[in-house]
Image (spheres, rainbow, N blue to C red):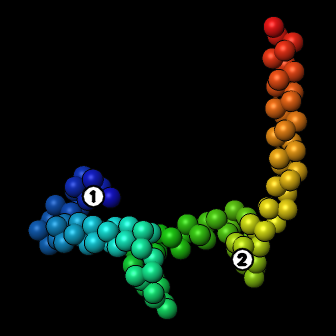
Amino acid sequence: MVAALYSNPNWDDEKNDRQSRIKELNKHYNEAIERIYHPERFKEIEIDWNNPFWQAHARSMQRTRERFGLANREITMQHVIDAQSHDAAKLKELERRAEMRQSVDQLSMN
């Protein structure tokens, strides 16, 4: 994003404060890293959805919900994860069969 701020000619105007915007981006980035490594330090009841980091997250989560068909339902992502875990045994069996077929194919080529 910093490269975009420098390459965008709209920020060349003196009225635009590129330096403070870069400092703000850096502050939010450092806060995000702190939250990842030390989540216990940040016990917030409400998320600040005006923060650009969280706005991007909200857009990403909305696209993910739409992709899974959850856009306008009361189904949570945990429901999707649980449903997928039920199919994990079937998936492992299919992977095992594929590995067996591959080993047989390799034997026939020798």
> Which residue reaches farthest left?
14
Relative to residue 107, is residue 34 drawn left or right?
left
Q: Which of marks 2 and 1 is in front?
A: 2
Q: Could you tell me if residue 8 is visible in this image?
A: no
In the displayed structure, 47 sits above or below 66; it is below
Which residue corresponds to the image point at 32% horizontal and 68% vertical from the top-left?
30
The image position of residue 12, as x and y in percent, is: 16, 61
Which amino acid type corresponds to the residue marked 1 in the rendered image? Val
* Mark 1 secondary-structure assignment: helix
Task: From the image, tell me which residue sits under label 1.
Answer: 2
Q: Viewer-proximal residue, 88 or 57?
A: 88
Task: From the image, tell me which residue sits under label 2.
Answer: 76
Tell me, for residue 90, which label it has, or none. none
Count of marks overlaid on the render:
2
Quadrant the C terminus occupies: top right
The image position of residue 105, as x and y in percent, is: 85, 19
Q: In which quarter of the image is residue 8?
A: bottom left
The image position of residue 6, as x and y in percent, is: 22, 55
* Mark 2 secondary-structure assignment: loop
Which amino acid type corresponds to the residue marked 2 in the rendered image? Thr
Q: Quadrant of residue 14?
A: bottom left
> Which residue reaches farthest bottom?
45
Q: Viewer-proximal residue, 103 or 56?
A: 103
In the displayed structure, 105 sits above or below 54; it is above
Relative to residue 28, is residue 109 drawn left or right?
right
